[in-house]
Image (cartoon, rainbow, N blue to C red):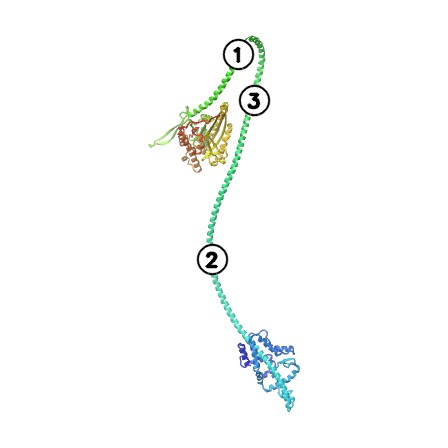
Amino acid sequence: MDYSENASMRGSHLRPPSRITAPGMGLHEMSASDNNARTGGASSMMPPPMKHKPSGLPEPATKRKTLVERAGESTQSNPIALPTSRSVNSAVTNTAQAGPRNTSFSSSISSSSSRNPSTTSRTTSASSTRSVVGSIGRSAGNHLRSRTAMPNNRAVHSSTNGTTRPATAIGDHETSVSDHPVLGKRKAWDTKGRLEDMESLYAQLKGQMDSTTFERNGLEETVNLYKTRHDTKVMLSTTNTALDDSRRAHTHEVDDLTRKHRNEIEDSSDRHRKDRERLRKEAQEELDGLGKEHREEIDKLIRQHKDDLNELENRLKAEIEEQRSQRLKVVQDLSTQIALQQQSTDINISNKNREAQTIREDLSRTASELEQERALNDSLKKKLAEADANNIAIDTSMRTMKAKIDFLESDNQAQSQAFADLNQKLQDAINSANEAQEKLRVEETLRRKLHNQVQELKGNIRVFCRVRPTLDDTEAEAKMTFPDAESDGREVQVQGPEQKSALGKITTATNSFAFDKVFDPTSTNATVFEEISQLVQSALDGYNVCIFCYGQTGSGKTFTMSSSDGMIPRTVAQIYSTAQRLEEKGWRYEMCGSFVEVYNETLNDLLGRADEFDRTDRHKITHDLARGSTELSGVHSVLLDGPQSVEDMLAQASRNRSVAATKANERSSRSHSVFILKLIGTNDATGEKSEGTLNLVDLAGSERLSQSGAEGARLKETQSINKSLSCLGDVIGALGQGKEGGHVPYRNSKLTYLLQQSLGGNSKTLMFVMISPLQLHLSETLTSLKFATKVHNTHIGTAKQQAKVKD
Ligand SMILES: Nc1ncnc2c1ncn2[C@@H]1O[C@H](COP(=O)(O)OP(=O)(O)OP(=O)(O)O)[C@@H](O)[C@H]1O
């Protein structure tokens, strides 16, 4: 057994369990299993079974049954189906199939069994011979009994009383030979019989021995199986311990790894935090950079956008301006049409008025004629009565005449001669009347010639001085005297400002100025006009005439020129009446009036629209040097056929100036106004034609820039006024030099260029210098008088008449 164990131990390579290695334990330990311990007799033959000691391994929940137990169960459940060695072998084989170690374990069992066939018998022989013999005897008896009940003589177990008993319970049948049921029946001398019985018994015993050997082998296999199981348990325990160690190690490792991982996580987190911080800083810096770039880009875009906007605005402004100009043009065209319609309407109205006037005159004439007719009728009635009376007287005288006829018939020849004489006298009278008419026409032409000769003798540029009256009694007057007012009225004396000499003596100088005519403050517009009416006549005669008023603001220029009884209305009235008068002499006149102003070197049409004022180059000035005429583009020219049309024209000009004055205060004072009257006369009888222009100019205030203290727009106005007045002086000065073909700087200002045809050799010029009587204006007064004196001392060449003779 020990050998077998050792062999199996060697074959299995498993560590032997500690219990098994204990001496004397071996098979007894296994034989003391619960199943084998059920037979009480066995205890006397075999060492007492060891109590089962706990192995230290945990017991399985349900204890696995041994093969013997299972075999017993099978026997109990089926007494006929006994376990065979094949089933044990198969169990062993099954166990062996579990692994190579079991295989070797099984083989070691079989080999040990085969190698030591005597081991079993020796072990059995270790019991006493008696017990063996008794046992053989009982076994043989049992065997015989059981052979009748059990067909299979190879069965290991016998079944008695329904219980399974292991065949190995040899000690169970231990009896003496004398008590043997078979051996006891032979006689003592029947040795042969006994020998036969012994042989038979021996055969049975041998069979049992074989069976027992076989069973023993099975049991050994079982023991080996248990050993294997035990080894397995030990292995399992070791494995569990190793597993626990491994688990602990694993736990430690896991802890270490966790710790390490945690540390790594913390490091990583720290790194990540630092990276995040760095990235955040970088991002912030990048963001700042981007923000800066973005802001610069935005600024750039804004600038570009502003440029675009400005460009767009300029373009839009240009478009708006263009549209505005187009619309203005349309409006202007419409205005022109309306003005033309208005003009034609005005003409129609004035025609109608004239017709009405004519009708009224006809009516009054008819009424007066009717009155005359009535008177005539009355007188005729009277005459009829007288005629009746006369009739009687005539009858009387007829009779007397008849008597006389009778008397005269005797002298008929003499009477015929008397009638012929009378006819001749009548014809002579008619002829002399025609001759007188013709002489009158010639004399008219001669008168014109003589008149203009007189004007030329007076000088082609004359200067009149007019001092306006004081308007407010509280204002201090300058000391002015008019020494020859009662006679020629050509001189004015003005006491200058006080001057302190080097010795401290205060003196005042009296300045004397002489002009063609001086009008004192008492002079009226009618008086003034008498003096200029002859110049107006010159315009009718085909001369270009220019009358302008010069003087500081408030000195009376507009009052003299444009007031209701000023020079302009009086001039037109005179021309109108003169033209009518000249109709008798064959002259028919056409009068056209224009009214313009020059403001800041820009020409404005005062008969046009105020909102079109101050547009540069709106009106262009062109001169026809051959005809000595001037054309103004886009300027309204109104046909003047009576005093009323002149009044309307002046009113419209005044309205426009007051509208424009909202833009620049006191506009009338700050601009030059020019009333242009064109007079075209034709004489069908003589074939004569005349074309003259009369310019009546109201100049802007001439106060000096240093004294006016003007600023801004007012400064520009003043500079413009001073420039044009200075240019006027230059033109007059150049004309005064009288050089043939010499340069006259007309183009230096708009005003002189406008008046080019009315200033100089081809025209008659009259300058009014207007004077304020106030002490306050003394300085400007003296300046104006000095300028006027210069002009007065200028001699301009002979004027030429623009008359043309019909072909
Ligand atoms: N001879 C005069 N008789 C009565 N009043 C006058 C006379 N001359 C001017 N006035 C008055 O003096 C004031 C200023 O005259 P006016 O407006 O004609 O001056 P002006 O020189 O034309 O001024 P401005 O240059 O500003 O047009 C007006 O009230 C006007 O009626």
Tags 1 and 2 touching, CB below 8 Å: no
- Relative image position of residue 426 (x, y in whole percent): 52, 15
C-alpha gap between disc 3 and disc 1: 41 Å
Name the residue that disc number 3 marks: 366
- Secondary structure under tag 3 reads helix
Ligand 1 lies in quarter: top left
Q: Earlier in the sequence, mark 3 or mark 1?
A: 3
Secondary structure, mark 1, is helix
Could you tell me which quadrant the N terminus lies in? bottom right
Q: Nearer the viewer, mark 1 or mark 2?
A: 1
Question: Which circle marks residue 418 in the picture?
Answer: 1
Q: Confirm whether residue 257 shows in the render.
A: yes
x and y percent of residue 217 in the render?
59, 80
Task: Give the mark, 2 or 3, whose residue is nearer the N terminus.
Answer: 2
Number of dots carrying numbers: 3
| Residue, far bottom | 189
Three-letter residue code for mark 1: Ala
Tell me, for residue 279, which label it has, or none.
2
Q: Which comes before the other along the chain, label 1 or label 2?
A: 2
Question: 179 or 619, which lies in front?
Answer: 619
Q: Secondary structure at mark 2?
A: helix
Kind of residue at badge 3: Thr
How crowded pointer 3 is (Cα within 10 Å; few <14, some 14-19, many 20+) is rated as some
